[in-house]
Amino acid sequence: MEVPAREAGAAQRHRPGAGVPQGTAVPAREAGTARRARPGAGVPQDPGAGVPQDPGAGVPQDTAVPGQPTRRRVLAGSLATALMAGCSTGPDAPPAPDPLQALWSAALADAALADAAAAAHPDLAPSAGALAADRRAHAESIAAEVQRATPSPSASSTATLAAVVVPTDRAPAAGALADATRAAQAQAAALVTSLPRYRAGLVASVAACCASHLAVLG
Amino acid sequence: MTSPTSTPSPETTDAVQRALAAEHAALWALQLVTAFLPAQESASLGEAATAHRSRRDATERLLRDRGAVPVPAEPAYATPARVTDRPSALALLIAAESDAAAAWRSVIERTDEAAVRTLAVDSLVDAAVRTTRWRRAAGLAPLTVPFPGAP
């Protein structure tokens, strides 16, 4: 039996800014939430984590040059644009959106919900905070894969989402977290048999992570 | 997804064999730790053993259906550390489940067969959940990782 790969996993979950695109396309409810990680907050880089092991894909690494649009910003814009475009119809309708986009937006929404639940209910903070961190990591890896598959140079959007509403009572709040996590597990697992290999592995791990959180949330 | 043909993919078969080996190792670990965990954890151990036996059997059937001879269990396995008490026993279980998770995710990335992927994702999910439960029993943090089984 191999020595456990625990350290790698531990490093991944502390990746700075995981899954929080820094552009205007960030869902409005992301703004101002607590526990928002900052890029470059003294955490070692984690090269390759969640990035497809696809030699020749040539995905550029994120660079955190102040004032410059990062890949995340560009990505956030292109994803939101695609999501909005997906609502249009007619002969000029764009191609079907990437099947991972729904997973991306669900991951961000869950992270925002978990952050809000942690802020409103301190005794939920440990489990909700961990859920928020993992769901942000999911959003980042999914976004990287979507961007790899369909690079888009444009980045402009004013997409906003509804504000997060967390039940004021603890039990319903915990229930809302569990419901969202259960739905996320099912959403990811349902894609495992239909996606290309790397993507199938990625969404399978997302499903397994959500199942792990359910075991904690009860 | 394509269905199995008369010539099953050797890549898929090899990955499934490695997952079976991980299931054998997990069962061995569960047996080994029994003496070091208190009685109140025997129910969890029993559930885990039942689940792994079920996976092992399903995996062996899958391999035979592909015309492969399932790899047998080893008499013993190297452990990350000597198992002498409850913490080291839980550490072994965590390592075994993490190995199983990695093996099953690897299967998913090495097959286009829907049935194989379904077995693999179910196994990956279960291994991740058990990892979290053992980590909680051990009082370790964090309880979860964002991508169980990821290389």
Image (spheres, rainbow, N blue to C red):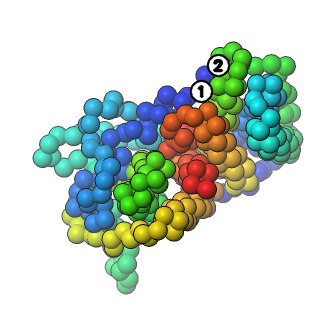
Q: In the rendered view, does A46 fall on the left or right side of A180?
A: left
Establish if A149 lies above or below B86: below
Q: Give the numbered dot on residue A212.
A: none
Residue beneath the point at 48% across and 30% down: A8
Q: In the rendered view, does A198 fall on the left or right side of A21?
A: right
Q: Residues within 10 Å of mark 1 (few under 14, many from 20)?
A: some
Quarter of the picture holding the C terminus of chain B: top right
Residue beneath the point at 82% across and 22% down: B74
* Secondary structure at numbered mark 1: loop
Looking at the picture, tell me which residue is in the foreground, B34 or A29.
Answer: B34
Q: Is residue A211 visible?
A: no
Q: In the rendered view, does A208 fall on the left or right side of A80?
A: right
Q: Which residue is mark 2?
A: B80
> x, y (%) of residue A85?
33, 73
Residue kind at label 1, given as amino acid type? Pro
Q: Residues within 10 Å of mark 2 (few under 14, many from 20)?
A: some
The quarter of the picture where residue A93 lies is: bottom left
> x, y (%) of residue A140?
38, 49
Q: Give the numbered dot on residue A4.
A: 1
Establish if B120 lies above or below B38: below
Q: How many marks?
A: 2
Looking at the picture, tell me which residue is in the foreground, B85 or A153.
Answer: B85
Spatial separation of the CA atoms under disc 2 and disc 1: 7 Å
Which chain letter goes with mark 2? B
The quarter of the picture where residue A65 lies is: top left
> x, y (%) of residue B26?
75, 32
Residue beneath the point at 61% across and 22% down: A3
